[in-house]
Image (cartoon, grey):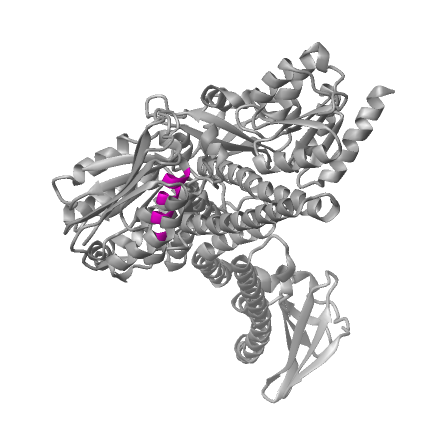
Amino acid sequence: MNPTAKRILIVDDNVALARVIQFAMDGAGFETVTACNARIAFDLATQSHFDVVITDQQMPVMTGVVLCRKLRDLPEYQNCPIILLTAKGLELELPRLQHELDIDATFSKPFSPSALVKTVNELLAAAVS
Amino acid sequence: MFGNHPNLGFPRKVVACYLLFCLVAVCWLSLGLLWISHEVLSSQSANSCLSRLGKTAAAIEISHLRHGTDELQHLLEQAQTEGGLAYASIIGVDGAYLAHTDPNQIGTSVAPTTGSLLRWGSVSGIRFFDQQGQALQEYQVPLIVNSEQIGSLRIAVVEPSLEFTLAKVAQYTPVAVLVPLALVVLGALVLSRLTGTVAEIEDQLRETAVLPPGVEISLTNLKARSGATLGWNRIVETIDKFRSRSGHASLNERLTEAIASRRQKELVEILQNLSDGVAVTDTEGRITFANRAIEALLDANSDDGILEGSAFGDRLIHDLPELAQCPLFDPDWVNRPTVSEGRRHGTNSDRVLRVSRQPLVAERLKGHVWSLRDVTQQKLADKMRDQFIDTATHELRTPLSNIKAYAEMLATCDRIELEQQKEFCNIINSEVTRLARFVDDLLSISSMEVGSLSAERQKVETARLFDEVLAKVQPMMQKKDIQFEVRLPEKMRDLTLDKEKMVAVLVNLLGNAAKYTPAGGHVALKVKLDDKLLQIAVEDTGVGINAEELPLVFEKFFRSSDARVQAETGTGLGLSLAREVVRMHGGDITVESQLDKGSTFLVSIPLE
Amino acid sequence: MLNVEPQGAVDVVRLSGPLNHENADQLVETVQSGLAGGQPMVVLDMSDVPLMDSAALDALLDIHDWTLLKGGVVKLASLTPLCGDVLRVTGVGGHFQMYKDVKVAVGSFVQ
């Protein structure tokens, strides 16, 4: 366990997908935690700090957008990079959401995990500077 | 002349001509009469003079013989009176008057007279004009006594002049001329009477001929005197009758009007029979026409039905409050065609109505035409389809995302261990299978819903059916170490079912039981078969379904939000499909469940 | 026995048992007053009706006329062969749209 490794929270009700993202992030040197729904994710986020949050949009009980809103209300997550995994069709609302919730990046499914890793690195680099 | 007189009609021309020619004839005859009389009188006077001459000469000769010259004057005067002579005279041989009716002349010598000579045998005569201008005829005859001429006798008569003749004729004129005249006039009267009716008819026709176009023809009845007038009256009567029936309309106009009113009735009937509601409002929004369907659509009872003259807009807003926000009631849109939808809260259920309004600009109508339609079913179908698409795409996208992610990892990552590579490939494989099954299920359920897929019922060996089912589910049961109890009836007669679909249903139910029952749990398949009914129960001791979700489990795509269910893969179509198939067989499927305890699915199919 | 099940805006009336003078009136009554208001959209599920008599035919015609007057429609579904023949021979069937399946009948209202 690398204490300096950045921690990533992965939220998706699709367990298999969460696992493969985790695999990709682990391989890139990050520390990852997965949650299969937003409620659990929010609890985890308040319990410990994460440097990046990757969340799916379409989830039962609580959607990714609502989770974002809730996180942005917390002071420690106001500037945290959040990536939204979306389904095609929600793109119509995205510009507004992105602006309103300050979502840093969106990926529409299906997507490439490597590209996701690359974006995470870029966002972290930007956050530092 | 008469023929071209503009104001005389033909019958009157006839009468005039008749009068003309008759009068001319009468005049001609009168003149002729006059002339003839004149000639007759003339010759008559000459003849009488001549006859008197002889007689007088003889008398004088005799008198001379007897009495010498004493009686001669007396004889002359006698002759003059008898014969109406102008004068008579005896001239002696010396050439002096021996006797003369004019006593002054006696003794004087005879003056010679000039004139035209006349001669009849031995009588000579002379025609001359005397001092007064009268025409005289003088005749002379020698007097011979004892073969000795003693002198000559001269007598003269006045030749009758035209005036004389006229005077003579005048006494006869009243009878001779006036009677024919009277007859002619009488004839004219009769003639004019005969042609009088024709004249009247002709007058009216002429008047009509000169009327300017567009002016109403007015004809009057005539006194019925002949067939012609009777016929005329009949025509006038008929024309009047036509006119009185329609005021001022011509026959054509009235026909058009009759056809139009019948057509209008037909059109109203047609509108009343439409299933769409049709209404017409005037410029103030008041109803001028509403068909039956409008009342039905707005669920108006006969009490507060759609009244003519009431404000349609108000009624609509009252029944469909959502419309208040629509362009329908935006003043800007008064002249634009608009279509809006509103929800009407009915007694038992809500209905969605489509309200379309078009401005009406016609010659005599201004306002709006409204069309109302019940689109509730369409809206529901749309909603279902949208939901379906949303869920279906989500369900399709999930395995796709997984396949892509794992495949890309395999392709790009160099540090994957062999074990993990295998695992990834397996995951890809199973995702593909899941996707394929989902697509199949989707297709099946869509076809079944539309009715294009139906149960193909054939005679099936029931035992074989269950064997197949068990063969498919045993591995699942074994893998999770589940106690699988199977209770089948001893005697299983053949049934008429769609084997393929029934097997799929049972496999699905048992598969669910296995999926949602934790390891070591219990699943039972109990089958009861009698003459009337086939009952199959699938019981498990799995996660169960909570009361809220229980009625929803058979809905398409429904998946419980229970984490334990979410953890398993599932399309949400299995139970809906099962229900469709069971219903196709005329049966039904029900469920009983208790959360955390387990569920029991019961399939009942009636048999013939 | 009559059972009314609304499917969306369409009312599905499921009849059980023979349709005759005993229950024909009840059917008419149910259709005319027991349904959702507005234009009537009705499917009669006849799958459980083995036979029908003249009173039934009268009732069907009454229902037909009433719905027509309101601009609505009544459709028949899942007729048994005997009922189908009766309707065909008497000519009453000519007034109704008939479907093999309730689902398809309900679906036809989307048009």
Q: Nearer the viewer, residue B514 or B98?
A: B514
Q: Nearer the viewer, residue B3 or A108?
A: A108
Give the overall secondary structure of the magenta segment.
helix
The quadrant in which the N terminus of chain A is found is top right
At x 69% / y 47%, what residue is drawn?
A: B410
Residue B26 relative to residue A54: left or right:
left
Please provide the residue range marked out in magenta.
B502-515
Task: Please name the residue shown 70% across and 33% down the image.
Answer: A26
Q: Is residue B465 above or below residue B341?
A: below
B236 to the left or right of B401: left
Residue at screen point 56% across, 23% down: A62
Residue B21 drawn at (x, y percent)? 56, 66
Give above or below for A67 relative to B253: above
Q: Is residue C72 visible?
A: no
- Compared to residue B232, the image places residue B321 above or below, namely above
Viewport quadrant of the C terminus of chain A? top right
